[in-house]
Amino acid sequence: MPSIKYENLRRERVRTLISNDVKQRFIRIVGAENYDDSQAGRLVYSYDATPQFQSLPDAVIAPRNTQEVSEIVKICNEHRIPIVPRGSGTNLCAGTCPVEGGIVLVFKHMNKILEIDEENLTVTVQPGVITLDLIKAVEAKGLFYPPDPSSMKISTIGGNINENSGGLRGLKYGVTRDYVLALEVVLPNGEIIRTGGKLAKDVAGYDLTRLFVGSEGTLGVITEATLKLIPMPETKKTMLALYQDLEAAARSVSKIIANKIIPATLEFLDQPTLEVVEAYAQIGLPTDVKAVLLIEQDGPHEIVERDIKKMAEICKKEQAVSVQLARSEEEAEALRTARRTALSALARLKPTTILEDATVPRSEIAKMVKAINEIAEKYNVKICTFGHAGDGNLHPTCPTDARDRDEMERVEKAFAEIFAKAIELGGTITGEHGVGAMKAPYLEWKLGEAGIAAMKAIKQALDPNNIMNPGKVFAKSTRKRVVVTR
Amino acid sequence: MTTEKERAIMQTEFQKRMDEDELMNCMRCGFCLPTCPTYIESGFQESHSPRGRIALMKAVVDGLIDPDEDVERSLNMCLGCRACEPVCPSGVRYGHLLEEARDIIQQNKKHSFPVRVVRKLVFDELFPYPKRMRIATALLGVYQRSGLRSFARRTGLLKVLPSSLRDMEKILPDVPALKEMKERPRHLASEGAPKRRVAFFSGCLMDTMFMPTNDATMRLLQLAGCEVIIPESQTCCGALHGHGGEKQKAKELAKQNIQAFEQLDVDYVVTNAGGCGAFLTEYDHLLKDEAEWSERAKTFVAKIKDISEVLVELDFHKKGLKVKPQVVTYQDSCHLRNVMKTSASPRKLLRSIQGVEFREMKDADRCCGSAGIYNIVEPEMSMQILDYKMEMAKQTKASTIVTANPGCLLQMKLGIERAGLSNRVRAVHIVDFLLEAVERAQEAEHEEHVRKTS
């Protein structure tokens, strides 16, 4: 975990990347009220939700339309000024921290839902739309947009697309990537392109839509998106399975999948997580058990009934001490909400909270949970684990204190070992949070040298001047590989 | 404008006084953003969000930025509604951070002469003295009753006031005469057998400008079975001082109030204004560094209860209350909800009244923009927030908007005026509405009795 990058924060830093002449050009494009280079204005866009990362941009610009974005990008390309597109700044990989300064683009003006097409089952939006607002708008028409990152009340669709956000429903319904049909993108040279369309089938050339999804703002600025919708599932049931044995819970996950049931949600919380979540949410979560699974199924009534019954049986067979069905939608929603606050609630324990999202094939969940606990013990750090067990995406989380240098070092070593273990099990260093600046030093572990080179070639081709969100995805140097001997 | 020297002093004070752990506790998850009225109304500007403000405070402490005008602007723009606190999973006590930061800035900056005079008058010479509050209110009464008001309104004399104050003038209640304000009860017996012995915190504005509401509160307490004690030596709660960067004065008032109530041997100290009540419940924080007072403050704090909680506890909602059929909605008092955690009881009481069709308005828990003196010092943002509120209120088609705090009540009245609804919609304090319901129920009972016996 690198310590806070202060070089861009020092007050005495006089060098600005933006000359007065360039500043005037920006202002002519967006108007003075949409250009902010005040000290305070820059400070509040120097961070996102990632601990330990902070760096001041040179200015914050709020464009009002795609044309303005294009003009801004052209100037930046000409003057080699970094651009960081930013939604609500809730990402957890320092993806929107302007580590090399430059301008932060905010989309407060570009926040309209442009169209809900009930014939093609699509919604077309500008990047600044809040995820939950979109979900509510389509649900009002009986349609369903499944990706539901825990921050959906705050996050923007533009941010979700750039980070390829997941969520609780990922197991059954997939992630943001699976719902993006078409994009309007401003390329680093200022050209505006449109990819894809309201099409279920489209093989005309490279799939640029997929390339831009999850590109973390390093390839261009997304200015519009058309997303796929599906019909709302008719019913939904929620239940909680309690365990006195961590691995029994993890085993249940694999067994459920092996029994050919794909639940809508299959979330895992261990005891330390349960305790803090309950302290915050106070909805009567059990805190005297070692782990719980939050399980949901949706769809036609008979199928939901059948699956829930079968999953309850599987859980009991795998030594669940109790299986409880939510009695009402309010109770179910309380459970889901409690789960979504897990990360932030963990922050109550200590001042600093380091969260990772190492992901493994779901068959390996039990092994991974076991390994995480052993690694925590080995380095003498506290690690709480929760996450989307159903899709193998775990969130080992470490409450710590950035001021304690010695502990921070051990935390860093522990997480390096967790990454290595995940890769060894056929997994990845990040399932849904992204690489950003935070995990860039570890990317090569997953991709190998040739993999990195291939990605760099794409970046180089589209953004030869490296103005789009520089310092992300690709690290200056790779972290030394940890060898796991177990 | 602050000078460079003033800023340097402020910076040192920030480093000395701001609670570093509390600042570190904010993990910047952003869960507070969707609940912040100024973040929403400013068009999602991070500097007008709780997360942004905490980042600014921390940056000043870390020496990364100066406490310049923009930082001050960001802190001033905050309503202090504290809607960010219940949703903060990390439990950051934002209100405390804000109060401290504002105090540092106010105490170390040189205000312009007129601002200095007004601040001194209001904070030091008026609110702390019940007698002066009565006289000031009485003067307002003279203005209202002598024909001066109609003269001023007729001649357009009021146009010399800024529009925010002009609007305020319109909605001030007709105040009682000096004589009435002087003769306040000090002890009231319960109606029937006493179930609780309570003290009533009468407040400064509430006991003058809103005196009938205080009378209604005491009457309800009696009816609910409370013996009520109203100590004379109590004073203003100090909320205006605390929120306005006059912490020292707030502490003095707090001590005076603790002294006034601690010997009384009561079950509760009852409040009827969310703003005051919330500040009283935080006396323990205010006095945490004063050894002689911190324990006494804790004991005092444990007894503070809003009137609606007391009434529900004493089953007042089962009393067969009645009003004329009407649609009613409820606007939360931010501090009552977010600090005192009272939001269910007022609704329970309202729903229990026969004739009330209760309709929850969207975002009832979002600040109305009154926020102490915010609507006077930040009229533009305040009115923007209020207009949204009235839009939501209108959608419920309510003819009665109930609130639980004098500031909110005035703001609602202002909103009704602005929306041109004054012939259809009224705003009323919950205790006045409850008393109305008691009286209506008694009338109905009486009519029934007459009908049966004749």
Image (spheres, helix red, strand yellow):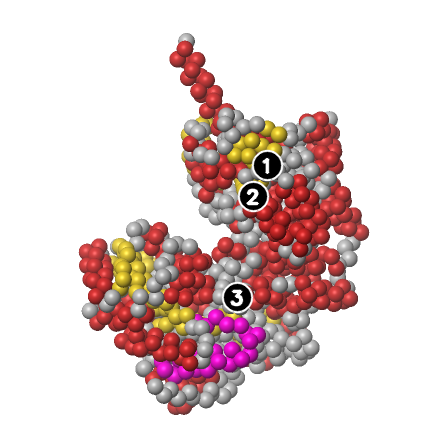
- The residue located at (48%, 24%) in the rendering is B440
Between discs 1 and 2, the one toward the N terminus = 1
Identify whether A262 is placed above or below A325: below
Residue of label 2: B303
Residue A333 place in picture, x, y as percent: 36, 55
Which circle marks residue B28 in the picture? 3
- Discs 3 and 2 carry the same chain letter: yes
Magenta stretch holds residue A271: no
Q: Is residue A399 above or below residue B433?
A: below
Residue A399 inside the magenta-drawn segment: yes
**Which residue appears at 52% of the width and 84% of the height?**
A465
> Relative to residue A61, is residue B304 depicted above or below?
above
Side of A396 relative to B301 (left or right): left
Disc 2: CA contacts within 10 A as few (<14), some (14-19) or many (>=20)? some
Q: Secondary structure at mark 1?
A: strand
User: In the figure, is residue B104 to the left or right of A139?
Assistant: right
Tell me whether circle 1 and circle 2 mark residues in contact (CB < 8 Å): yes
- Does label 3 or label 1 sit earlier along the sequence? 3
Which residue occupies 23% across, 67% down?
A318
The answer to which of A290 and A84 lies nearer the viewer is A290
> Which quadrant of the figure has residue A145?
bottom left
Farthest-out residue, right:
B113
Segment tinted magenta in the rendering: A397-422
Chain at numbered mark 3: B
| Kind of residue at badge 1 | Ala
Provide the major secondary structure of the magenta segment: helix
- Image position, residue A252 (x, y; %): 26, 69
Which one is in front, B306 or A44?
A: B306
Chain under callout 2 = B
Residue hosting label 1 = B199
